[in-house]
Image (cartoon, rainbow, N blue to C red):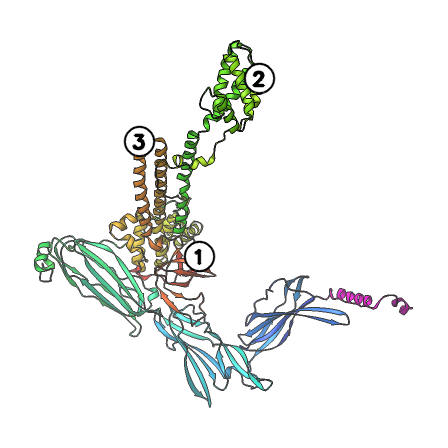
Amino acid sequence: MRARFLSRFPGPFIAALLLALGALTSVFGQSARWQPDRGTLGLGQASEIQLVFENCSPSGTPNVPRVNGVSLELAGQSQSTEIINFNVTRRVLLTYVARPTQRGSVDIPPFDIPTDKGNIRVPAASFTVGDATLGNSGATLDSVIQARLNPPAEPVWAGEVFPLTYTLSIVRRFSAQLASNVEWSSAPLAVEDWSKPEMGELTSGGETRNIATYRTRALARTPGTLALSPAQQLVNVQTGTSAFGLFSRPTMEQFAITTPAAGLTVKPLPSPAPAEFTGAVGEFTLTSKIVPTTAAPGEPITWTLELAGTGNWPDLGGLPARDASRDFRVVQPQAKRTTKEGTLFEASLTEDVVLIPTQPGTYRLGPVRWSYFDPKAGAYRTLTTETVTVTIAPPATVAASGASTSARETPVAADTSSGPRPGTAPLPRGLPRDPIAGEAAAPRPLSWLAVGGLAAGSLLLPLIGWVALAWGRARTTDPRKVRRAARVQLLVTLRALAGTTRADEQRRLLADWREHAARALGLGRSVPSATDLARQAQAAGADPEAWNRLWTEAERTLFGPDLSPLAPDWTARALAAAAAVPRARFQLRSLFLRRNLFPWLVLLLIGISAASLGSDLRAADAAAQYRAGQFEPAEQEWRARVAAEPTDWIARHNLALALGQQDRWSEALGHATAAFVQNPADPSVRWHLALCSERAGVTPAGVGRITDDSMVATAASRLSPAEWQRVAIMGAWTLALALGLFLLHGYREVRWLRTAAVALSVLGVLAAGIGIAGAKHYADLGSPDAAMTWRPTTLRSVPTEAATTQKATPLAAGSVARVTKHFLGWRRLEFTNGQTGWVQARDLIPLWSAPPKTPAPPVRRDASARR
């Protein structure tokens, strides 16, 4: 019976039906699981486990939970389809590389994962981590490969620069290759980059081992016992061979080699410390040089201090203060820090103070004292420079003696007219001033390409005026203007003629009709001949016979012997003939005739302006917190304001004040520089910039040429670079206005227009030239993409710290460049000399745009504030 029933359906139909039923039953079998979900993993050895999805697919990349003691990295994805007894099972397999980092048990907890069939729960998986073995050799990984992080065994002083090595030892009979650089989180140490590996050999236990040694230097700032993070490096090891036909090839496995725990003991510096001690630890030299030692009033004397050596340079501030008589005018010192290439702890700091004497006399300069801690001797040492006597002779004396040291000297003890007088207290060192109330956004500078493009748009102003004047002149001088007016009057006259019955009124209107008709047809004469009228009517596109008949009947009525009246249909025929005369339209091409377009020769100048509006918002809470000594809350308030409005120079200035009060002078210098370039004329901003430069020991690149006493620098610092750009653009607009007045003078012949145009031309040229020169004087500081390094960092050729083969160079604090590209947490800088490179964004303070949302913690607390 069943056979007869099934025989009614074809075979393909039954097969398709069974497949559909199998697919339908598979819908209800979705699952996800680890494969394998238990077993043993080798410590540091890469093993593959799969996350298998049956009859479903993950929605995106699964978010696998983090598991302590093992790293899981997605390595690939594949799919498979299985049909058993018409039951279709589709699988998606995600392959993960599991690399254990510690011994013991590793448990992957259950978790839910979204799929195209809804959320599916993945069961837990558990593995035991044991010793990794190398192929079939039976040797454990620890016996073949060993890594060590080797800090000094003896305690070190806080701030002392000490050597640090990393060694990797591999048994030679196991062929191995380095697969990565050394990965190590150095916090809380400050370290230099690892050196290139030094290769060597060592025989131990009858085995010859290859040794790779990496070296660096580090320092610890905080005393105590420090637990150093383990270092890790990937190594590819040959674990066997595999045959391929007549050939064989090595089988390589990758292992993550981790160093065991290492510690470091850091001793605090002894107390009490000398009064001149500012936190320097290492070996240093201090030299003083004064040139010349004999001069006349007004002649500059350069006093150079140079500090050099090896030590904790990232934590050092500026050079010690120097005392000089009030009879010297002091030019702001320009400090220059030079770090040895490829190092962090070897540098020199040079500062030139220019003294300009105002009175003759004999003066003593120095000595200068500076203290540091010598970690090798375990004691504080004080460096003292020699005292130099400087003679300021009257100009005639100096000239007579050839400005040599043989000039007359006055004993210092007997000098009562110059030099520091007994009992006269020196001026106090600079301190941060009170914050500025309110908020004000400075205009942001434009790129020079944008300035040029916008300035070119000002051509529209004189061009539109020129076209309007030419249009008016063309309409005025248009020869068809008379014909158009006559045609209008002709129609008006005929309508009036149709509405009157008085004979005298008809004759007057008929005479007007003859005059308007002649002009409408292009005849200047009021009484043309019949031949001229017929010829002109035909040329104008009208019916010559109709006009000849109208003209003849009008003359008969006006001048005939019997003064016969007009025919009753004459007015209608005249209206039809007048309407048939084509209108003499204005010809647009006459606009470009020389008499209309060029009443005089003119040169075209271009320009446009752009404006910015400032904002004035409330900041009373932050100022109140600052005055109450709550510097950190005030810092956060002003930092939030700077993030919202990067060109608020008041917020930038006040943020620098709050950072300086916390001895974070290097970061304070970055925001003080931003406040200065945004509003260089404010006295408080200039004062605090000089104070931050002194305390940080760095003068930002390009600031010195704006703050010196030259006439150009004084003029340039009156306005910000953005304001100078606007002066230049206003000059371009003034030139455009002058051009418009010249055009108007050519059309209107008004005497005062020419004088005003000449005056505005001169004013526009001066404004444009001065504005461009003023903006260019700021160099990169005036770029809208300008940024400054607020701490020493490294300029890299590629945006990563992993590639040791890349070229890199140290980048000093205070360097200024333009940011040209962004890549994750990196910024590409371009310097004025064409050099480019990548630095991390946290090491930069943008001068015109918002700083990073989460600023890095300060690298140091400047010790110069505690002197």
Placement of the N terminus among the 4 image quadrants: bottom right
Q: Residues within 10 Å of mark 3 (few under 14, many from 20)?
A: few
Q: Is residue 445 left or right of residue 573?
A: left
Mark 1–mark 3 Cα distance, whole angstroms, equals: 60 Å
| x and y percentages locating residue 840 in the rendered image | 43, 62
In the displayed structure, would residue 227 be above or below residue 513?
below
Q: Which residue is mark 2?
A: 570
Residue 751 badge: 3
Please state which of residues 339 and 226 is positioned toward the viewer in this rendering: 339
Which residue is depicted at the point 31% across and 72% down? 375
Mark 2–mark 1 Cα distance, whole angstroms, equals: 91 Å
Place residue 303 in its image quadrant.
Answer: bottom left
Q: Secondary structure at mark 2?
A: helix
Residues at badges 1 and 3 in contact (C-beta under 8 Å)?
Answer: no
In the rendered image, the residue lying farthest to the bottom is 206
Residue type at mark 3 is Arg
Would residue 729 be visible to someone looking at this image?
Answer: yes
- Report the mark closest to the observer, 1 or 3: 3
Q: Secondary structure at mark 3?
A: helix
Which residue is depicted at the point 45% across and 85% down? 209
The question of residue 7 being in magenta is answered with: yes
Residue 852 badge: 1
Q: Residues within 10 Å of mark 2 (few under 14, many from 20)?
A: some
